[in-house]
Every structure is written in structure tokens, then in C-alpha cells.
Amino acid sequence: MRLYEYEGKIMFRAAGIDIPSFMMIKGEEEIGKIIPGVSFPAVLKAQVLTGGRGKSGGVKVVKDQAEALATARQLMGLRIKGETVDSLMVSEYIDITREMYLSITVDRSKRSYLILASPTGGIDIESLVKDNPEKVSRIYINPGEIMADYAKRKVAKALMLSGNEASLLFDLLNRMFNDVMQKYQADLVEINPLALTKDGRLIAVDSKVTIDDNVQPFIIGQLERLLGRNPSENADERFKYVQLDGNIGVIGNGAGLTMATMDLLKSLGGSPADFLDIGGGADKEVVNEAFKRILERDDIKTIFVNILGGITRCDEVAGGLIAALSAVKDVKLVVRLSGTNEEEGRKMLKDAGIATYGDMLEAARAAVSLTRES
Amino acid sequence: MRLYEYEGKIMFRAAGIDIPSFMMIKGEEEIGKIIPGVSFPAVLKAQVLTGGRGKSGGVKVVKDQAEALATARQLMGLRIKGETVDSLMVSEYIDITREMYLSITVDRSKRSYLILASPTGGIDIESLVKDNPEKVSRIYINPGEIMADYAKRKVAKALMLSGNEASLLFDLLNRMFNDVMQKYQADLVEINPLALTKDGRLIAVDSKVTIDDNVQPFIIGQLERLLGRNPSENADERFKYVQLDGNIGVIGNGAGLTMATMDLLKSLGGSPADFLDIGGGADKEVVNEAFKRILERDDIKTIFVNILGGITRCDEVAGGLIAALSAVKDVKLVVRLSGTNEEEGRKMLKDAGIATYGDMLEAARAAVSLTRES
Amino acid sequence: MAILVNRDTRVLVQGITGREGNFHTKAMLDYGTKVVAGVTPGKGGSEVHGLPVYDLVSEAVSDNSINTSIIFVPPRNAADSLYEAVDAGIKLVVVITEGIPLHEELKAIEYARSKEVIVIGPNCPGIISPSLSKVGIMPAMVFKQGSVAVISRSGTLTYEVAYHISTKGPGISTALGIGGDPIIGLTFKDVLQMLQKDDQTKGVALIGEIGGSMEEEAAAFIGRGEFNKPVVAYIAGRTAPPEKKMGHAGAIVSMGSGSAQDKILAFKGAGVPVAETPMDVAALLKEKV
Amino acid sequence: MAILVNRDTRVLVQGITGREGNFHTKAMLDYGTKVVAGVTPGKGGSEVHGLPVYDLVSEAVSDNSINTSIIFVPPRNAADSLYEAVDAGIKLVVVITEGIPLHEELKAIEYARSKEVIVIGPNCPGIISPSLSKVGIMPAMVFKQGSVAVISRSGTLTYEVAYHISTKGPGISTALGIGGDPIIGLTFKDVLQMLQKDDQTKGVALIGEIGGSMEEEAAAFIGRGEFNKPVVAYIAGRTAPPEKKMGHAGAIVSMGSGSAQDKILAFKGAGVPVAETPMDVAALLKEKV
């Protein structure tokens, strides 16, 4: 669950991390609220979940009220990488001496917490790692260990901070790790840029916080109380769905098989429209819902169902397909059924007039050629 | 640092652990305070740090105000194993269905936290382990692990609690472990008895809490704020002292050597009056203070100083001895000096008229026979 | 001889009274796996498929000879079950559960590893040494005994590959799903180290996917010559967009790393052929084994 | 060959700029120990006795070949220093510091052990293999090279015993103080296991004291025949009253366990002679070695 910048900053503020003061403008009708209490210059920041907001013109410094109002009207409703801006942050302008990069995440292969720190910040971490790998320090925190003081000293050294600034950093790291990362079970807490100011403060000018999708319900409850929304609202579908650009709807069981199906369609010249994994042991209803989800779009020409039944029973899937058929109009259907109760399933579909295959490659070829024809 | 029962209960209350309500009577002059607000029957409990208080008559149930006042006067000033009672707890009387034993401590050889649980309580754990070892369950909590739920289920089973009572226990264990043991870095948190009441409550009827002597200063600060006293006040002496019953004062450097000195005196028919370890690298001043401490008592006949100099320099110790000599009057002095700067030290003492030895056994023999003569 | 599970494997099922636990206990028993007991808190004293059910793992272990556990409990209790198995002295634990909170998974698995316990999964189909023992949820019929090991981050994709190796190829020594979560107990490299010493295994099908760097680490291990049996790889997710989780919590190209292209290049650089489709794996292996 | 430290031991001093660290660095160098670097946060770039000082252990390790560390930092930072040494890959750490908070000690030592790092101490005099290497604070003159190992929970008592073994007996292979704290890295049993394999060691002086059950565990280990060289024990604290800490945080008879009598009985039951005084240890050993 990716959080908005302002939500991350609400967390930071609750954790005692120094942030620029800000107010939120939600929707056109609140733009007028900018006037009272804002001191200029200020920064208007479009609130979107996708990265690269700055480059897309989503962040503007405004010098007075008139410019603020005009810029706000311009930003509100802007499309950034497919996302429509419907809220703006009006943020205190910070006079920055130096911009740094600081984040805490989980390192998969070392099975460890990982602090990334760079004395230069403000650009995205991918470019940072690509262009100046020597400037990005990696400090590991073993999960069976506390965040040891020596690790904090390493981070201070990496960020070229000492004396009082280092003390501020130690405090910041404790708060990031204990009161944000651990408390809300984030899988990423990123401050980029972390600003050092002339008066020696360390300020989190931006925030990027991602919460683990699998957190226990009490964490969701805490998030909801803090943020006023449940960030997992759309996460409890019974299948997993990722939208793609193509025209062949893909339904598979198992993440690997479903990805392999996308890849196969592509290598045969087809174009997958989605990743949709109904998982193990799916019943009729899930299959039916999966169909509905794919057919929400009007650019789908074919639906390719690829089921290798283990726990999942082919006859159960066939039942779901047949139930969903009424909704399928101008869309072609190619079904591969193999594994548990394969024969029953294929017979059911045959009786309903749907051609089925036992082999994945044959089925994929059929799906691609059918799509070409249409 | 051993805490008083009422101090442990203040901790328990702060941690949300269910305890009987109580008030404290400090000194004779507060006995009159018993009257208002106390409902009878009630329990008067002498506050002392030594165990076995019940057997020594330090706990009394009183049925009305007259009995309460009379009993309080009787308890106040009572001597229990050498300790004088100067404060009483007036505690709510709890109607107990079953008494259990529950404690958390540190297991040294398993390097682990250890929960001890027994479905019968109210008697001391030593007797419990000796008489009914099968009734005492040991549940280990690895320090690299959280207190896992399964461990709590094990404790519930050991205490023969289920359903709602088990849920209360799980909550109690969390509070004991996180909000007492870990928060204040206790090395023992004991509830004995833990009472199950008719109305299904779990109440900590007694408390025994010991805080690690080496806790960081911020823990001491927390304790002081909570309890209104600094429980480590007498812990910062520059040497380690334990009082014994004999008449030969013992000063050694190093815990093992000092204990060995006591043991040796005893095996030669002598009787050590104390354990006093001046530690490694002691200077004149420490030696001087150590002498003063031993001479506070008037039953000392001989002082036996046993120094094997490694870091500790014999000449430094000799200097301290000479400086302390003025305070030594009717007491004999036997000194063993060996190791770093041995010759300088022995010469200094010889010049001051003090006989010294290089061998521990010879010196101990001299100390015992000198003591016999006097 | 296969690896990790064989005829001496004696299995405890944690969460045996749940729907999945119950169903797969039966399936494992039918396969001939020596499942000997189950645990479900509060259900101690009952029976499932004739097996005794206990409240606590320590009780099950002291009453029965057990060396392996399989965990089916729901995500919110799964880490706890792993701690319980480790503390009871079980040395191989298969965690089927999907959706364990990341931080709990991280701590519990590091804990298990510090106690030298082998964890397969979480979020995996388990392990099968065909004709010897199955400790998992895979459909047994696609696994025929033979000489190729299958290691995979995916369940159904394992079945797809195994089916071809079993029907058209040299058959399977041990197949195991290491799991689709970001933090898992056994890596590809760990398993290759075990397979190196296994006489029955003559070749390996390694089925990776996007996310993390386990495939690259395995490729480097092979490239250094530390594994010297033939390997054929397949990587799922070449068409996956970045920053999106593809079904598995661990299948995500993030912060510029974990792409299928990187992994394919790594294998090719180590001299490991990479199959274009899952179906090609068996054919490529047949040439080498 | 002695155990744990020898001519290949290359030592880092953590807390080298402190009074104790500085003093004993000089003493170790004088003895011939290969001390190669030091660490004190904030003092990086300076020198002590000609050795480079670093801010971080990882920096010292990457600049120098280091396999052993000795920690002199104050109690409130000592656990942190142990984490730092472990995470930097050092495999033998001697912790001299006395007074480390119990809970920190517990967690840090369990962490080190989970990473297969050997910790000697805390609250110990260190280790010496006479004529080869001294990583500790003991006065070198009382240790002459020979064939008896001395293991002890106490510092000065070790010197007392070692003096007699060195002057009147067969001399010393390795002497080490395992530490006077309740939680320590190496137990008597751990050290006996190492000594079993050490050719130089022909006999052992085991100097225990009240508190805990390490002596009983060592006795049981010897009693089972797992250690088969002659051992002579001495136990300090026969006259100590219960529930009182006798100098060492770990030297306490508590909740009815840890008494000298129990330990003496355990050793006698295992056929290990127990000396009446520290001075008798050398004589008893001389008969056997």
C-alpha cells in the first residue's frame, strides 16, 4: 500500500520527525483556502502515487498569493502518468543548504533491514545508484538485532554529518525505524530529499512510505485512525490483478504460470491485457468475478484462460466459465484446462460450445491467431 | 536492586496488571490514616526486602478498624530477619479460588528468558521446586524472539487456565514481559500468589521485582519518577561489600580471590566478617574507604588484606593501608601482597611496622592464629 | 537418494484441523508420506484421519518421532507456528501459508536460520521426492521419479515444467517450491549446494521469476564452478511492468532491480541455457542429462 | 598449539583511546601480541602506540587483516561494540568490560552466538596462550608455557592458580577467564570441548565459583566421558551467604541453586578431584599430568 506524500508526512509528524509545515487542498472548491495563514514563497505539490512528479510539472514554487491561486487551478485536475491530481499540498518553502537521500527498506537476499544513505539527494534512487553508485551507502540492520548505535554512526558518516547534526540524525533514524517502519510495518520509508538547513535542522522535505500489504488488522486500524482512510480498501479482492496495455485478457492459476502465459502470448506476437491470477483452489464465483473484472474494459478481443489444476479443480473452473458466458459478447474465449478433473471440465465446456486445449502452447497459439483475425 | 512489594505493585498498576487496591502507612504517625476509606476485612503487610515475611508474622488479616489499628502498631517496628519494619501496606482482601505461581526471570545457562509457572502458589518457589518439581513448568523465551503466542498457550496450560481466563493470562504475560520486565530491565518479576477469583479475575496478590544492578541511567530515571526514590542509591560504592557474621575483616582484589580468602579462613578455623572486593586497579583512596567500611563495626578483631597485583599495584595498596592505619586501633592487621610492585609495597609496609606475607596460605594461617590470641 | 525428504521423513501438520490442512494431510497420507501427528491449539486430544491432534508442538514431538513440519495455519498465526516448530527442535519446516506479514516473516525466518532450521517457503507448494515422500500440496500425478531436480518460486509453473520432465524427460529426483514471498528460508543457491551432493540428481530445472536477486546469485554460484551438473533455467515475467506485484509478494521489479532481462543475462553469462517457454525446459534438459 | 589465540591472532582493540584500552594495548604489544588497529568513534585518523585508530570496526577490518577483537569500552556502549564486531565479521571477541546491562548482554551474546562468533567474557581477564599471544589484561609474568589449561570465572584467582602451576607445575597451554557475569559467551563445557582436541593441553584446572549451573554441566560432560584428560577443580564461595552477589554479578546462590556444595558434589561424582584451596590445584594436577 503506497501512501500519499501528505500521509507519509502525517506519520512523520506523529513520530516527531521534523517536516515543513503544510496544509492540504482537496478539490477545486478548496483552492480558496490557500490564502489565510500561508506565508510566501510556498511550494504547491500535486499529490499522486506515481513517481517522477517533479519532472511532470507537479511541483511549483509560488511567490505570492496570486501566483498560488493561479498555479493551484492549473495543477488541480492535471494528469500525471495516468493519475488525476485531486489534491494539493501547500508546503512551507525550506531554505536548503544540502539535499541528502535516506531510506529504510527490507533487503530480500540478506534477509535484513537496509538503510540507504547518500550525501546527495533530491533525485530518484535509481538514477543515484546508476550514476553515482559510490555515493550510496548500504547499512544493514539484522532483524534479530536492535538498530545498533554503530549503524547510526555509519549512516552519519555516509551522509557527511557530524556533531549536533549527527545527533539530530541519530534521533531521526530511531524515529524512522521504530515509530514509522516498525510501528506501521512499512516496507519502505524514504526521505528524499532530506534537507540540511542553514540553521542546522534536518527536515524531511518529501516522504515516500509503503506499507506491507499483509499487515495484521490492528495495523490497518492504526493507519485508519491516523490517516482517516483505510489504505488497503482495494486490496481484498479474491484474485490478483495488474492491468497491461494489450488486448488478450489473461486468467491463470498461480502467479508464475500466469506470468509465463503473458510472456508466451507476447513471444507468439500477441499482446496481454492483464495479469489475473485466480490463485489455488478457486471456485466458480471467483472465476465469474475474474471475467467481470476483465470485461470492464472495452478493448479486450480475446480472453485466454490457462488452468493447470492441482488444488484447483478443472470442473469447478469450467462451471465458473459457463456461468460467466452470458457476459461475454464480442469477446473470443480460449481455454486451456489440464490437471485435476480435466476431463470433466473439458466435457462441460465442450457441451457449452467452447473449444478447450490440454496443452499451453497450442492454446496460446490459438488465442493469438484468433485475436489477429478479429 | 530489590524493590518493595508496594513498589512492584506500583509498577504492575502502571503496566495495567490487576492488583488489590492498597494504601501505604509510613511510620507510626501515619497509622491513624488507616481509618478512612478502608473496607474490612483487610490485610496488613509489613514492607521488607527479605523473603519469608509471612512465616515471620509480617502479614495479618484484620476484620475491623480496631483490630487494624492494634495490629498496625504491633507490626510497625517489628524486626524481620534483621530488617526493621517502617512501612505497612493496607491491602484489599481478595477472595481467592486458587493460588498460582508465575514469574519471569533470566536463565543463565540457556541464555534465555524463563517463565516459571505452577498451578499451585503462595509458597516460595524453592519449596515448590523441591517438593513438587513436576508442578513447576519452565517455558523459555529466546531473547532473539518475541514472546510467541504458543509460549503463552504453554503457560496457560501449565496454570490450568482456559477460555476467558487464558485470555486474561495472555494479556497479563504481555504486560509482565513488555511493560515491567523489559521496560524496567528487571531480572525477576514474580507474582506469588497469582490469584484466580470467583468472578474470574487474575489478581497479582504479591509482587517481587528485582531490577538489574547495571541498567542504563535512563532506566534509573524512569524508576525514580515512578517510585519516588532511586533504588540504586547505595549501589555506587567503589568496592563490593557483603556483610558476614565473623570477626576477621577480609579485603581482597577480585571476586574469586576474595571468596577464596573467606573460604580459606573458614577452613583454617577462622570466621570471615565480610566479603570486600576492591576490584582491579584500586588506588589508595579505595583502600582507605574499604578500611573505614570494615571498621564501622565494633566486632572486628583482625583485618586480613589479600592482594594479588595484576593491574592493581602493590605499592598503591600499601600506600592506602598506611593512610588508613590511624583509624586501626584495637584491630590486628595481616597483609598478603604479591604481584605487580610487590617488593616496593612490602617494603613500605615493613617500614610502617606491618608484617606482610607473599603466600596466601601462610598469611591466612597468621590471620586466624592472631585472631584466636586476641 | 533425493534431498531433504525421503522415507525417513516423519511429518507433523501444524493447522491440521483447518480446511487445507485436513485435505492435504489426507493427500500426503495417500501418497505414502509418513504423517504422524497434527497440532491445532484447542483441539488437543481429537483425531484427524486417524492421527493424534495436539495443542502444542512440544507435546506432539515428545509423543512421536518427528523431524519435519508442514504449516497450514492462517497468515496471522503462521510466524508463531514457525517459532513453535523451531523451539520444539524440528529441523525442517515447510511453510505453505501465503500472506504472512513481511516484518514477522523476516524475523521468524532469520530466527529459524540462526537455530540451523531449514525453512522451505513461505508461500510455496512444498517439496516432493517422487515415490519417497511428499510434504506439500502439489498434485502428485505430475511428478515421476527420475534424475532431474526442479527448484521453483512458483507452484503451478512447477507442475507445468515437472509434467513435461516426467512424461517426456528423465523424471524427477526432488521438486521443491522455494516460495513466492520476498523473504524465504531457502534460496536457489542453498538448494543447489544440497543438490551438488545428491547422487540421484543429474540435472536441474531452475524456475525463477522477476523480483529480488536470487537468480543472479545462483547464476554467479554456477558461474564460479561451484555447481557442476547441467542446469536449465526459465524466468517468468519478461512482460511484467515495473513497480507492480505480479501475484507473488516477491515478484516485483523495483528500484530498477529484479527484471527478467537481468536474470536471463546472468544465467546466459554463467553458461546456463534459458528456456523460452516452460515447455522447452524438459527438451533442453533432455539434451544434457 | 593452544586454543583460540596463537601467533596468527591479529587483534583489534575497541576502545583503544580509553585509559584501560590504551594501557593494555601497550602491555599486549610488549608481550608480542599482534595488535594491529584500534577503534574509538570520533577518534578516527589518530594513532595509539603507533597503531591506526578508526571510527568504525568495518573500516579497521577492511584496512587490516583482523580475526580477533578485544573490547574495553564502558558498559553502556559495550553491547553496541559487540554487535559492531560481529557484523563486521570478526569471529573471536574478548569482552573485558564489567557492568553491561543484563538484558543487553543477553541479547548481544545470543546474537553473536547465532552468527557463530565466539565471545569470551564479558567481565573477564581475557585469554593467554603463553609465549604465543595474550588478548587480555592478565599479568603475563605468572603464565609460563606448558601443558595445563586454566579455565576460570575469576581474574585474580586465575593468577593465583596459574602462578603455582607455572612455578611448581607443568606450566600453561592456554589460560582463559570466561567471565564473572550471569550471561557469558563461552561456558566451561564449551572450552572443554575445544581443549579435548588440543594436543598441547594434557590437563585442566577448572576454577569455578558459586552461581548458575555451568560447573554442574561441565561435571556432567566429564562424567559422560566426553572429556578424557585429567581435570582438577576448585570452587570459590563455600562460605558465601545465599541471595547475595559476591562481587561478580553472576556469583550468587539464588532460588536454592548455585551453591558451592552442589558444584563440589557434581565434580566429585564425575571423578574430578576438587582442591581445598587455590594453592592445592597445582599439586593435585602435578600428580596427574
Image (cartoon, coloured by chain):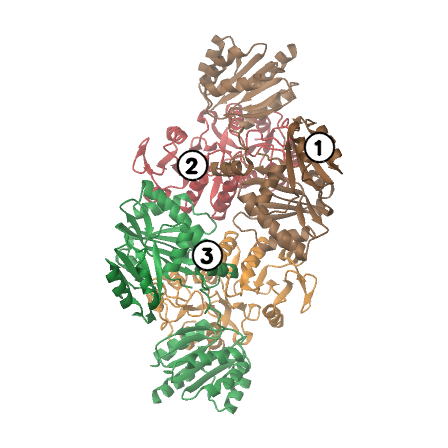
Chain colours: A brown, B green, C red, D orange
Residue depicted at x 53% and y 51%: A145
Q: Residue C288 placed where, x, y %?
A: 59, 30
Residue A258 visible here: yes
What residue did someone put label 1 on?
A58
**The numbered mark 2 sits on a residue in which chain?**
C
Q: Residues within 10 Å of mark 2 (few under 14, many from 20)?
A: many
Q: Position of residue B318 (x, y in %)?
A: 52, 84
Secondary structure at badge 2 equals strand
Q: In this view of the protein, which residue sits in the foreground, A168 or D30?
A: A168
Amino acid type, callout 1: Gly
Q: Quadrant of residue A265?
A: top right
> Where residue A126 sits in the image (x, y, percent)?
69, 38
Amino acid type shown at disc 2:
Ile
Give the tally of numbered discs. 3
Of tags 3 and 1, the one toward the viewer is 1
- Residue type, mark 3 in image: Tyr
On whether disc 3 and disc 2 are found on a single subunit, the reply is no
**How far is the residue under mark 3 from the one under mark 1?**
49 Å
* Position above or below: B150 against C168: below
Q: Is disc 1 placed on a helix, strand or loop? A: loop
Which disc number belongs to residue A146? none
Label number found at residue B184: 3
